[in-house]
Amino acid sequence: MDFFQALVLGVVQGLTEFLPISSSAHQLIVSRLFFDNEGGGAPFTAVTQLGTEAAVLVYFWRDIVRIIKQWSLSLVGKVPRNDPDARMGWLVIIGTIPISLLGVLLQDYIRGPVRNLWVTATMLLVFALVIAVADSTASQRKTLKDLDAKDGVKFGLFQALALIPGVSRSGGTIAGGLFMGYRREDAARYSFLLAIPAVLASGFFELAGLAGEDNPDGWPPIIIATLLSAVVGYAVIAWLMRYISTHDFKPFVYYRIGLAVVLFALLAFGVIDSAAPTT
């Protein structure tokens, strides 16, 4: 991987991680269409997600510090267990369990078969329809004050669907929240908080692997891509949180459908390979 490819993929990661359009799908498509390779594969994607997750940590810094503090104090009885921030700490932990378990159990499939672009195109289309239905039927009557353990697990299961490229972590989780009756802003906020443990764990796990002989790309391109994804990702979060307070998800639905159709056509005419090139 050269510096130009790292720059492009870092920007792509930052632009697409928080929008409901699937960053992993865009990484795969851009890498295979323009660079004729896997773009570093699942490990590279996981590590560059550390950059976009750093953007989440900065943007929600005050909320995160408050949640960790109150949760920690609740463990020693200095804060009631039903304190809103202490509860949120437990709910983030509970919601992280599904993707953690499935990520470990299905890692061979995540690194291999599901990175087929026919799967990606299908998921882009299917989840465009899922998001459209969720957005159009949502009552938006619930806030994060209504969040309980049962809904936390449901959020977590929707997040776990993002292990399949084309679904989108934010798209899956927010759609799940809308189906459960949560407001767009609240579903998005919990989606971003919920992603922190899973993304950090996955990213550092892959980082440890790349620290050895499994790193074919070298560190400078990875560092560049990760830093770029952080800067661009922060701008996208700030924009998205303002946007969804007054707008629906229709533009993202149309974009996903259009991208899926184009990808199906490229695959059908052999312009792009469905599977990663083997070397």
Image (cartoon, grey):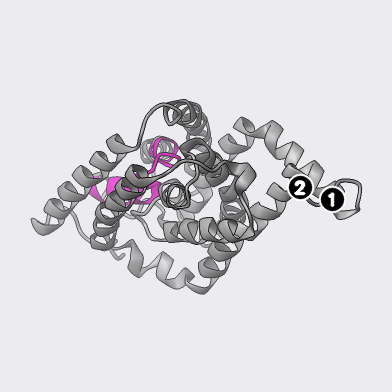
Asked whether the beta carbons under mark 1 and mark 2 sit within 8 Å of each other, the answer is yes
Residue 13 in picture, x, y percent from top left: 42, 41
Q: Residues within 10 Å of mark 2 (few under 14, many from 20)?
A: many
The quadrant in which residue 16 appears is top left
Can you say whether 56 is above or below 33 in the image? Answer: above
Q: Which residue is mark 2?
A: 86
Residue 130 in picture, x, y percent from top left: 32, 53
124 sits left or right of 62 in the view = left
Q: Residues within 10 Å of mark 1 (few under 14, many from 20)?
A: some
Name the residue located 57 percent from the left edge and 61 percent from the top edge: 153
115 sits left or right of 183 in the view = left
Q: Which residue is mark 1?
A: 74
Q: Is residue 24 magenta?
A: yes
The quarter in which the C terminus is drawn is bottom left
- Going by the numbered disc 2, the residue's amino acid type is Ala
Q: Is residue 45 magenta?
A: no
In magenta, the rendered stretch is 12-33
